[in-house]
Image (cartoon, grey):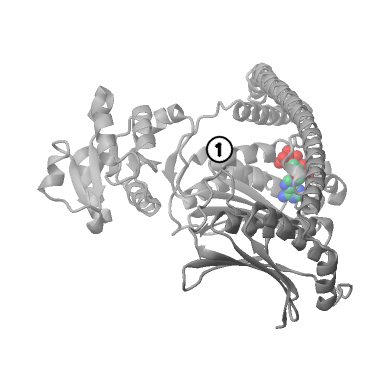
Amino acid sequence: MTETLLFTLPLEREMDVAAARQSARHIAEMLGLEPRGQTRMATAVSEVARHAVQHGGGEARLLLLGAPQPAFCAVIRHHAPSPAPPSARPGGPLSGIEAAQRLADLVHQDVLPGGERQIRLTILLPPRAAAPPPEEIIRRLRTEQIADPHRALYEQNIELVRSLDELRQRQEEMVRLNAELEDTNRGVVALHAELDERAEALRRASELKSRFLSNMSHEFRTPLNSILALSRLLLERADGPLTAEQEKQVQLMRRSAENLMEMVDDLLDLAKVEAGKVTLRPAVFSVAEMFGGLRASLRPLQPNAAVELTFDDATGLPPLHADEGKVAQILRNFVSNGLKFTQAGTVRVSAALEGETMVLTVADTGIGIAPEDLERVFDEFSQVESAQVAGGGRARHKGTGLGLPLSRRLAELLGGRITVESRLGEGSVFRLCLPLGLPVQPDLASLAPAGAASVLVIDDDESFRYVFRQWIGELGYPVIEASGGREGLAMARAALPRAIMLDLRMPDFDGFAVLRGLAEMPETRAIPVVIATASVIDAGLQAMLPPGAILLPKESLGRDAIARALRRILPGMEEGAQA
Ligand code: ADP
């Protein structure tokens, strides 16, 4: 790398600092740097030069480096050993060298063998053909007497004024931007308030709709019930004989009333779900048995011999802990839709376990649903065009467009979801995906009636909860669960379970805290607790537990151990609950 010395300056007095600054600026200008670049270079050099003047003086050498990376370099060397510049406090002024470090591309500090400090700052230059050769720069520096300190000070002042002006402009720009931001902010706040208002209005409207639906449905049910009862009386010939024609008419009346009743029931259900008034009745049940019940109740719906309704074998699947009535209601709706919209082929009901999720599927070979309608079928009262046009499926069967929206709400309530896949003309597959165990209800009080006969498992470890759910479920007890101590204590107080399976080591609120909480209230004090723990069970641990607590080491946990422990605390279990 070529290195050409351009200029050497003494650094003895304050005026030399101005001269160094001026020389650096002049060189920068000759090298073709823009005004801002010139100021940067001049300021970096003068800051380091001032440090030398203040610490016993020194000398500045200004150099030009050639290829491969052209650069300007200032080497400032102190005459005598000098202290390192103090580093700036946050928010305080920068020392000269720190300022230079921010301005130059490279700053290198050395302490020479005699203790003198040498600082080398480098500013990289853009490769530029326009710069004059180094000899020319040297010549001009000499002849133009740049070292005139008065002129240097004058130019420095002009530069300062220019910088101040630029600063003022920036500040004005900031003030304007700030005002703009404030305006935007005010707009956003106003928009928020408006959205809040709208959300509140929507919520009120939805509440009114639910209340209206619920009231109307109740009002409809009374006259419908009397039509059904009267038509039954007529068909039973309680008041004398009917002609064949009259019988047909009464049967038609009765069927219409039944259809209407079904619609009213759907409406009432939907209103109840929306108003949050549905109480779940969780229980452990087998999918195979539920299929058996569905098969019997759905057979009469089968419209013609060309459509076959089949149920796959579901034995061997783990039991579900959910509200059986609601699960069956959803599947019944899938199947009755399948039968409605299939003219020939099959409607097939099946179940499979996917991880911790039970997937209940109803697949048909019917008219299918167009892709753009797949989401719309879950909107209330929506019946899609494709179904109305294709195959005449809809022409024969009336519906309300409420079945699927209601099913979706119920599935959500059960902690699950519904998915659909369909192809126009080929058929549809509706799936209900449910967790094996019911999720914890946000409204704990709603668990009370069902929880009263159940076993509460409090464990932060998902896999242990799963194991307990399986084994205790098999013993015939519904299981309710909490994944933490605080939540578990709240559930125990709300649901008053028959027994509690408690883990000791849980974050935040551990088993000991749960035990203390249970002991505080007379209703929960008497609930028997089985402590399932991975800790070493020694005398120390036992001393910390209430007398009579049953300890179950987690490593030897098994179906029999749990059965034995539960049998000790729930004496009636053998007769009543053994599955
Ligand atoms: P309903 O059956 O009372 O009309 P649903 O909410 O159960 O109301 O269904 C909404 C609409 O979704 C139906 O009217 C129909 O257009 C479409 N649909 C539902 N299930 C199927 C299916 N298995 N095959 C084709 N279309 C279906």
Q: In this orientation, which residue lies closer to the viewer: 245 or 250?
A: 250
Q: In this orientation, which residue lies closer to the viewer: 170 or 296?
A: 170
Q: Secondary structure at mark 1?
A: helix
In this rendering, does residue 348 appear at all?
Answer: no
Q: Is residue 341 left or right of residue 130?
A: left
The structure residue drawn at horizontal position 74% and vertical position 46%, both measured from the top left corner, is: 375
In the rendered image of this protein, does residue 510 appear above or below residue 255?
A: below
The structure residue drawn at horizontal position 63% and vertical position 47%, both measured from the top left corner, is: 418
Report if the beta carbon of the residue with label 1 is closer than 8 angstroms to ligand 1. no
In the rendered image of this protein, does residue 79 appear above or below residue 150?
A: below
In this rendering, does residue 151 appear at all?
Answer: yes
| Disc 1 residue crowd, few under 14, some 14–19, many 20+, Cα 10 Å | many
The structure residue drawn at horizontal position 47% and vertical position 42%, both measured from the top left corner, is: 439
Residue 238 percent across, percent down from the top left: 62, 19
Quarter occupied by the N terminus: bottom right
Residue 537 percent across, percent down from the top left: 16, 51
Query: Ligand 1 is located in which of the four quadrants?
Result: top right
Picture quadrant where residue 193 is located: top right
Residue 240 percent across, percent down from the top left: 67, 18
The structure residue drawn at horizontal position 85% and vertical position 75%, both measured from the top left corner, is: 136
* Residue topped by disc 1: 413
Q: In this orientation, which residue lies closer to the viewer: 70 or 171?
A: 70
Residue 25 percent across, percent down from the top left: 78, 60
Which amino acid, mark 1?
Leu
Q: In this orientation, which residue lies closer to the viewer: 98 or 52?
A: 52
